[in-house]
Image (cartoon, rainbow, N blue to C red):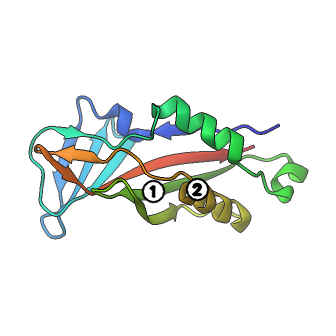
Amino acid sequence: MKSLTIVFLLLFATQAIAQTDGKTGTITVKKNSDAMLVYDTEYLPRGFILFPEYPGGERALEAFIKKNIRIPEKVKQKRINVICFTSFIVTKTGEICGIEVHQLPRYSECVDEAIRLVKLMGPWTPGVAEGAVANIRIHIKIEFK
């Protein structure tokens, strides 16, 4: 049975604390110290941020991944859960770039599959910071079980 959990950490940005590293223009937003977002922008936004959105929203993205995910055979056979923490940048034009998988799981097939899924997503609605379209890095968690 295909099953996964997608956590949009960006949806939890209300009552968030923002910190900047002061060097690269990267802003980290934390809420309740559990959720984290990283915004890669050409400048340091100081105001309102409208997050990138998958066409149709979170439910559409979850449906897309459930429909397209390929659970690796090793994971199926061992009946285990594997989590891939994936991030990518949604550019000003809505394209996806800079795909990364953090906290690499033991099974590289899951890393490959997470990257394949992100590449397959297609364009998003870009995010806005301070009234201007911005490149924004978002993080999602994909669970294989």
Q: Which of the image's four quarters has the N terminus?
A: top right
Q: Residue at x 34, y 40 (%)?
A: 33
Q: Nearer the viewer, residue 135 or 20?
A: 135
Which residue is the extreme one toward the right?
A: 77
As drawn, 112 above or below 71: below
Q: Nearer the viewer, residue 65 or 77?
A: 65
Which quarter of the figure has residue 131? Answer: top left
Looking at the rendered structure, the secondary structure element under dot 1 is strand
Q: Give the distance between the C-alpha atoms of the residues marked 1 and 2, in whole angstroms.
A: 14 Å
Please state the total of marks drawn on the protein image.
2
As drawn, 85 above or below 67: below
User: Label 2 amino acid?
Assistant: Leu
Left or right of residue 95: residue 106: right
From the top left corner, tell me how far across and down residue 144 is, in percent.
Answer: 71, 47
- Residue 138 - label: none
Q: Residue at x 67, y 59 (%)?
A: 113
Q: Residues within 10 Å of mark 1 (few under 14, many from 20)?
A: many
Residue pointed to by mark 2: 120
- Residue 87 - label: 1
The mark lying in front, picked from 1 and 2, is: 2
Q: Which of the image's four quarters has the C terminus?
A: top right
User: Label 1 amino acid?
Assistant: Ser
Q: Residues within 10 Å of mark 2 (few under 14, many from 20)?
A: few
Looking at the rendered structure, the secondary structure element under dot 2 is helix
Which quarter of the figure has residue 21? Answer: bottom left
Which quarter of the figure has residue 125? Answer: top left
From the top left corner, tell me how far across and down residue 89 is, in percent.
Answer: 37, 59
Left or right of residue 14: residue 72: right
- Between disc 1 and disc 2, whose residue precedes? 1
From the top left corner, tell me how far across and down residue 44 is, in percent.
Answer: 12, 56
